[in-house]
């Protein structure tokens, strides 16, 4: 299976010339070893972990970023490694199946060879296979499970709740779940999850008035005679990054002092291993691991970093492992502990890519998904346009999918500029594929989809960009919110990530002319976090644009000039903008 | 969640509980105001506020703990707790340095009360939240940054 890039491209050329279907199982079978998913059990305690699947029930494409910059102490360290730098750091062979899973390299060619990733029916097969070897293993769902697809939005998250139960989830913690509203969350927790015996945990969600826990902070489980505690950590900035009004009575925050309290309590009650199921984002988890003691591992998500091996963080009393398990159903983390007495004496970790061609679909899950989709198939499959371009979202500054969204917003709304949130979810589309309503909803399916057109002064535009940029590049991880930079249409700019707020954004231009601080511009946007905003849903705006265009080609990716991060920064490669 | 406690308090009217607390001597607003002149609360910058409240020669202290969010969920109601481990603490003041009038509160602690206050403050923008503790006639201080952001755009 291992080959260099040149051999790889040769194989593709031969395959294409002979008319072989590159997406076929036979093509893949020749490249991936038959024992790809043979993961021998280690020790006596096992956790399976997936996170941020963003409601993708079927196999999809998902391109990892080529820009994922670290700042402060995080420069050049996991997870801020892209492309070849990531392969080198983890000893992954270029051109291999793993290289395709963990990087953007040769994405469109490699995708045709290795096929789609994820899909709950395939994930179910993998989970069951690993569980069969690991009696008592717990399946942890790190959240962002209920949001991200058309069907999860249209079923009010019910399709994902049912799929999570069928998958065999044991413990879950939330982020985007909260955007279905506090009442809906509590309904699912107290009804569906209670019946299915799923623990929904979050130590850092308390009531605004008295500071009472909203959910169980942690659960204790017996695994093969070993007492383990799992502590939940919801996304700390849910009421800031998402609408406050959806969870008006709940307060979040990082709360590492109370995290320490719960770790200590669990240990005092006899926990021999303590793990955290976290939606902090990886940089926040790394900092928390250095401050809170007594945690064996933090299973992290939110920042969508597919990190092949845990980062070992030393703190005052020991070592905490920090993992991050990617997104979109693409990976399943497998952590095996050998626990003796009250200590984890050794561990083995694998972050397994879920290649749908290598894992037969579980018939039960496949039937469940089919049934959930049936009422919507026609709507989902509506062909809006064809894309000659390669459409992806992930990356610190922009993606072609987002470029398409801001282009559509500017055109339909008659705006000078447009903003699109720096979301990290959203599937990838290969050149030549149809843009269906389903693929458009992958980028836009949220419960606050209103579009807006606002008159803003140049000064306001800058202050918004500075504010969001600080949420991404504040040197202190506890001030980072885990999203990417707001996508900007119509405005060229220069960014200095290592600067401080107010000094990162410079040389803003609209149509080549400097943005005037006092002049008013028409700015289109979507996903307002304030209450009571009305406006046409973003998918309707973009769908009308796509139906009109019919073919998408020649998208011009607006990426800022980046200053001060160094030309050999391992968090950036193949940058299409200017790297000064 | 203690729904019963919440309903009882709602039913009994929240204002009533505050009145009870004042009557029991837990809060002494008039006393506190008497200690710090109105001019301190009206001062437009930190320097003037400190000067007008008579806090000179501030000493940074690690015995003061400020508990406040790193990023405010709502700038209009930011929960702040200050704990002073300094013996003989008689007053705790809170300032949001970039507010139009930075001095927000000054609590007088009488008769050996624990050096602890918990309240909510309003913040106009990202700023240091500063606590000034008076003990034995001296003034001690600590500060923590609380960010006020426009929100949105989360991953």
Image (cartoon, coloured by chain):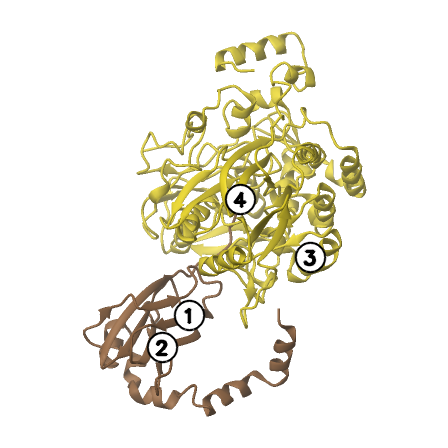
State the quadrant of the N terminus of chain A. Answer: top right
Q: Residue at x 62, y 8 (%)?
A: A17
User: Left of B155 or right of it: where is A370?
Assistant: right
Residue A220 coordinates in the image, percent (x, y): 61, 53
Whether labels 2 and 3 belong to a single chain: the reply is no
CA gap, disc 2 and disc 3:
40 Å
Q: Colour of chain A?
A: yellow
Report the disc number at residue A477: none
Badges 4 and 1: C-beta atoms under 8 Å apart? no
Q: Residue at x 42, y 30 (%)?
A: A575
Disc 1 target residue: B80
Callout 1: residue from which chain? B
* Chain in brown colour: B
Whether labels 4 and 1 belong to a single chain: the reply is no
Q: Nearer the viewer, residue A58 or A202?
A: A202
Q: Nearer the viewer, residue A76 or A69?
A: A76
Residue B121 coordinates in the image, percent (x, y): 42, 73
Disc 4 target residue: A299
Disc 2 target residue: B115
Which quarter of the figure has residue A131? Answer: top right
- Residue lying farthest bottom? B23
Which is closer to the viewer, label 4 or label 1? Answer: 4
Identify the mark nearer the N-term, 1 or 2: 1
Question: How would you rate the neighbour count of disc 4 (Cα within 10 Å): few for under 14, some for 14-19, many for 20 or more?
Answer: many
Q: Secondary structure at mark 4?
A: strand
Question: How would you rate the neighbour count of disc 1 (Cα within 10 Å): few for under 14, some for 14-19, many for 20 or more?
Answer: some
Residue A126 coordinates in the image, percent (x, y): 67, 32
Which is closer to the viewer, label 1 or label 2? Answer: 2
Position of B72 relative to A123 (above/below): below
Report the disc number at residue A189: 3
Residue A140 coordinates in the image, percent (x, y): 62, 45
User: Left of A174 or right of it: where is B149?
Assistant: left
């Amino acid at each position: 299976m291992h080959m260099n890039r040149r051999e790889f491209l040769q194989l593709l050329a031969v395959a294409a010339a002979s008319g072989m279907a590159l997406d076929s199982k036979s093509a893949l079978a020749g490249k991936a070893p038959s024992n790809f998913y043979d993961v021998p059990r280690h020790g006596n305690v096992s956790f399976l972990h997936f996170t941020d699947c963003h409601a993708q029930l079927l196999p999809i494409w998902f391109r990892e970023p080529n820009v994922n910059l670290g700042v402060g102490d995080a420069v050049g360290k996991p997870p801020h490694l892209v492309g070849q730098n990531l392969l080198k750091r983890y000893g992954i062979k270029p051109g291999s199946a793993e290289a395709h899973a963990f990087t953007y390299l040769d994405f469109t060619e490699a995708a045709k060879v290795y096929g789609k990733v994820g899909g709950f029916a395939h994930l179910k097969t993998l989970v069951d296979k690993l569980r069969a070897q690991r009696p008592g293993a717990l399946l942890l769902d790190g959240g962002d499970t209920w949001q991200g697809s058309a069907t999860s939005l249209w079923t009010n998250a019910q399709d994902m709740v049912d799929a999570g139960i069928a998958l065999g989830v044991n413990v879950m913690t939330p982020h985007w779940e909260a955007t279905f509203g506090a009442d809906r969350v509590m309904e699912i927790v107290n009804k569906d999850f209670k019946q299915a015996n799923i623990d929904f945990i979050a130590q850092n969600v308390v009531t605004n008035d008295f500071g009472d826990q909203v959910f169980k902070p942690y659960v204790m489980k017996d695994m093969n005679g070993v007492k383990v505690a799992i502590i939940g950590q919801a996304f700390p900035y849910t009421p800031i990054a998402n609408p406050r009004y959806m969870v008006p009575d709940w307060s979040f925050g990082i709360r590492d002092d109370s995290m320490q309290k719960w770790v200590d309590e669990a240990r005092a009650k006899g926990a021999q291993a303590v793990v955290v199921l976290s939606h902090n984002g990886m940089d926040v988890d790394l900092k928390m691991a250095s401050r809170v003691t007594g945690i064996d591992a933090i299973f992290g998500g939110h920042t969508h970093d597919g990190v092949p091996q845990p980062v070992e963080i030393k703190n005052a009393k020991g070592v905490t492992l920090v993992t991050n398990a990617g997104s979109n159903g693409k990976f399943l983390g497998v952590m095996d502990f050998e626990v003796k007495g009250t200590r984890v004496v050794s561990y083995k970790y694998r972050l397994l890519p879920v290649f749908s061609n290598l894992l037969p679909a579980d018939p039960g899950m496949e039937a469940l998904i089919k049934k959930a989709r049936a009422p919507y198939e026609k709507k989902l499959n509506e062909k809006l346009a064809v894309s000659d371009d390669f459409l992806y979202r992930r990356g610190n500054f922009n993606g072609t999918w987002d470029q398409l969204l801001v282009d559509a917003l500017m055109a339909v709304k008659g705006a000078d500029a447009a903003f699109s949130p720096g979301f990290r979810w959203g599937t990838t589309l290969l050149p030549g594929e149809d843009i269906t309503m389903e693929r458009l909803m992958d980028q836009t399916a949220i419960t606050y989809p209103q579009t807006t057109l606002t008159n803003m002064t140049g000064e306001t535009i800058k202050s918004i960009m500075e504010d969001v940029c600080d949420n991404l590049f504040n040197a202190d991880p506890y001030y980072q919110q885990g999203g990417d930079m707001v996508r900007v249409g119509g405005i060229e700019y220069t960014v200095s990530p290592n600067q401080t707020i107010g000094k990162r954004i410079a040389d803003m231009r609209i149509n080549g002319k400097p943005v005037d601080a006092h002049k008013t511009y028409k700015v289109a946007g979507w996903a307002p976090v304030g209450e009571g905003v009305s406006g046409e849903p973003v998918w309707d705006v973009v769908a009308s644009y796509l139906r009109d265009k019919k073919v998408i080609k020649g998208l011009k990716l607006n990426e800022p000039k980046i200053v001060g991060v160094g030309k050999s920064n391992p968090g950036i490669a193949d940058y299409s903008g200017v790297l000064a | 969640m203690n729904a019963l406690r919440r309903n009882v308090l709602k039913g009994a009217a929240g204002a009533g509980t505050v009145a009870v607390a004042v009557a029991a001597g837990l809060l002494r607003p008039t006393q506190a105001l008497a200690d710090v002149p109105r001019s301190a609360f009206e001062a437009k910058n930190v320097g003037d506020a400190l000067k007008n409240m008579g806090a000179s020669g501030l000493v940074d202290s690690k015995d003061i703990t400020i508990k406040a969010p790193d990023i405010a969920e709502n700038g209009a109601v930011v929960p702040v707790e200050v704990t002073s481990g300094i013996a003989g603490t008689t007053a705790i003041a809170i300032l949001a340095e970039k507010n139009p009038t930075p001095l927000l509160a000054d609590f007088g602690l009488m008769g050996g009360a624990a050096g602890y206050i918990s309240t909510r403050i309003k913040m106009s923008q990202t700023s240091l939240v500063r606590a000034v503790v008076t003990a034995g006639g001296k003034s001690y201080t600590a500060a923590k940054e609380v960010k006020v952001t426009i929100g949105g755009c989360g991953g």
